[in-house]
Amino acid sequence: MRSVALGLCVIGLAGCATVSMVPGQATVETNLSVQQSALRTSSDAFYETARESGWVEKSTGLAGLARILMHGQDEAEDAPSDYSERVGAETEPPANVFSRVVTDSEAAREGLSDVAEQAVTVLNSELEYGRSDIVSFERSLVTAQKAHRSFSRAADLAATRNGGAPETVDAALARLATEIDEARRVADQLADRYASIDVAVS
């Protein structure tokens, strides 16, 4: 996947593209700083919400990030959090578990959507941005993928005791998956544009 390949590559760069010294530079730099800050702040807020809500356990390292984005989340060390235990997927009434999964899936979708909107704002600004913005956004993408796995696992466990899961659960998980796919597309665009900026100034 382009985004993770670029994201990991740019981590090792000594510097990043900067705004040229031209009249009005202060205004340009201020706007850029605000946009970068908004993207990173939104990304950090989404991650903290996911962690504090028990959707995920902790941030994955670079190797884990690459595996998740490029190949899915198959490795044991990148397993979802103990969300299933938290919501009582094997002990609580299935209806309660399903309700919680729907609520959390919608919250995760809305949170990721907010982050993606900030990323699109950066893209549409046609201004330069740094590698930290790409990394922050991709961490949000990884977090959402891990959360989706957590929700799906909890729903599956409850479904085994209920003869299946309601359509509302499948629909909520599908909406989150769609938002993840859209965020992945934006991440690719961020990485591609950063690559072109880096080539232009190197």
Image (cartoon, rainbow, N blue to C red):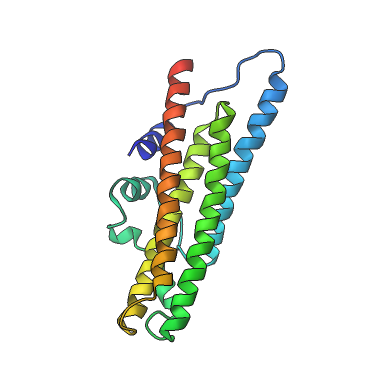
Q: Where residue 80 sits in the image (x, y, percent)?
A: 38, 64
Instruction: Tell me the residue at 63%/30% (across/down).
Output: 32
Q: Residue furthest front?
A: 167
The reply to whether residue 142 is in sight is: no
Residue 144: name its quadrant: bottom left
Instruction: Tell me the quadrant of the picture where the C terminus can be found.
Output: top left
Q: Where residue 111 sits in the image (x, y, percent)?
A: 55, 55
Residue 184: name its quadrant: top left
- Residue 56 vertical position relative to residue 121 in the rendered view, above or below: below
Front-most of residues 27 and 21: 27
Residue 18: name its quadrant: top right
Q: Where residue 194 sits in the image (x, y, percent)?
A: 46, 28
**Horizontal relation, residue 44 to residue 58: left or right:** right
Instruction: Tell me the residue at 32%/39% (across/down).
Output: 1
Front-most of residues 132 and 70: 70
Q: Residue furthest top?
A: 22
Q: Where residue 174 sits in the image (x, y, percent)?
A: 40, 60
